[in-house]
Amino acid sequence: MRTLALEVWEGLLIALRAIRVNKMRAVLTTLGIIIGIVSVTAMATVINGIEQDFEQDMAELGADVIYVEKWPWVGGPGMKWWEYINRPEIEPELADVVVERSRFATAAVPVVDTNRPVKFEGKTISGIEVKGVTAEYPRVHVVNLERGYFFSELDNRSARSVAVIGAGIAEELFPVRDPLGKPIRVAGHRFQVIGVMEREGSGADDPQSADQQVFIPFEAFQRLFGTARRSVSVQIKVTSPEVMPIAKDELTGILRVARGLGALEDNDFEINEQQSLREQLAPVKLAIYLIGIFLTALALVVGGIGVMNIMFVSVRERTREIGIRKAVGAKRRTILLQFLIEAIIICLIGGIIGVLLSLPVAALIRMVLPAYVDVGTIALAFGICILVGVFFGLVPAWRAANSEPIEALRYE
């Protein structure tokens, strides 16, 4: 081990000296690696960002929540949209029916939404998602309030004009004031703010984020905006994710009876849940990953071929040096390590430059797509540099290690 460590150290010093002598050539050689590493890190950041965004959306849906709706979440090639559009709307009363008859449902809430402007004094925010829900909403979904309280069933039944607003709306409308108790205008209708949600964090600028939403009592929503032509979603929390398959079967029977469907009639409703959405989107995610792997592999192969060519040139230029070293007793392993280390160092130099360039690139990508740079991505980039150096530097290093000393000494 000590001999091997000394050989590695000696090979490192020789490689650094060779790179220092040919600085311009080494920098030009790393261009392909730089492009490859920037491609790898950019693709990895986009994939990480999409994955995090997807998982955040899945977490908001809830692994133990069933959604009874008119439309399926994802349509396949044979989707018959004209059948779905002719289905009767989901009645909000189904939430009470499900809680009353289901063994697995712990709570159910009707949810309806619309996009409306929200105003306070002279400040207006357009396109805010206004959700009408009952007081059961916090029992179905996680609701973290920074201040205030969520409206009660009495508030809902009396259709009180009260609202719980997201953190993003609170910061924009009330930058220096406490929003609690203040009157806001939702599509011109006066509502009193009684609660403010905690900030979700990433994705706060997304219109679908709770940071950009307003929650009002379902009856107040119905009185002001109506639900006749709006799709109502009945969202049901079950006892645990493990009972989802049984709960869906039971729920199907309850809904068919409640909607008066005959034995031979098809369902006029859709049961959506997180796992089915994951399964339907899995091929899309796989396609994104495969395309990303192909593009980054192509860039790295181009960079690796450049490294291999330069290493062949380096071996040819130092043929006499190789012959002298072998004549005085250097082993094949020593020569092999020397040129492998040189190839790896060239790739690592390109990797360092590529990682530094990828940080502003990731910032630019984040302006249009979700992107996330983590330590694992940087470690992956340097790991790939080492692999590329070993893979594409092995053939030139092997040729150098197996050259005949006499022939090498004669080389001019």
Image: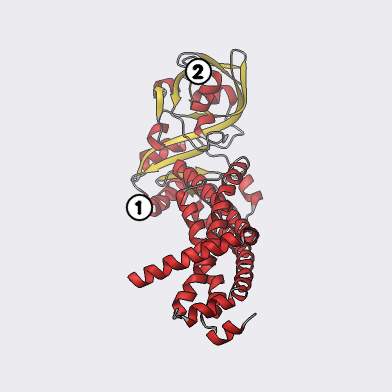
Say which amino acid is labelled 2: Ser
Quadrant in which residue 150 is drawn: top left
Closest to the observer: 265 or 235? 235
| Residue 53 visible within the image | yes
Q: Element under label 2?
A: loop
Look at label 1 and name its amino acid. Answer: Glu
How far is mark 1 from mark 2, CA to CA?
39 Å
Residue 158 in which image quadrant: top left
Crowd band around label 2 with a 10 angstrom C-alpha radius: few (<14), some (14–19), many (20+): many
Q: Is residue 384 above or below residue 374?
A: below
Q: Where does label 1 land, which residue?
A: 242
Residue at (48, 60) in percent of width and height: 383
Q: How many marks?
A: 2
At 46% from the left and 55% from the top, the residue drawn is: 379
Most foreground residue, 281 or 380 = 380
Q: At 33% from the left edge and 70% from the top edge, which residue is drawn?
A: 2
Question: Mark 1 falls on what kind of element?
Answer: helix
| Relative height, residue 363 to residue 401 (above, below) | above
The residue identified by callout 2 is 161
* Image location of residue 410, percent across then percent down: 61, 84
Q: In the shown orientation, is residue 122 left or right of residue 16? A: right
Q: Position of residue 374 (x, y in %)?
A: 47, 48
Direction from residue 402 to residue 198 in the image, left or right: left
On the question of residue 166 being in view, the answer is no
Q: Is residue 401 above or below residue 293?
A: below
Q: Position of residue 136 (x, y in %)?
A: 40, 31
Q: Nearer the viewer, residue 409 or 283?
A: 409
The C terminus: image quadrant: bottom right
Residue 230: x %, y % from top left: 59, 34
- The crowding category of the residue bearing disc 1, from other C-alpha atoms within 10 Å (few below 14, some 14 to 19, many at least 20), is few
Quarter of the image with the N terminus in it: bottom left
Q: Which sits earlier in the primary sequence, circle 1 or circle 2?
A: 2
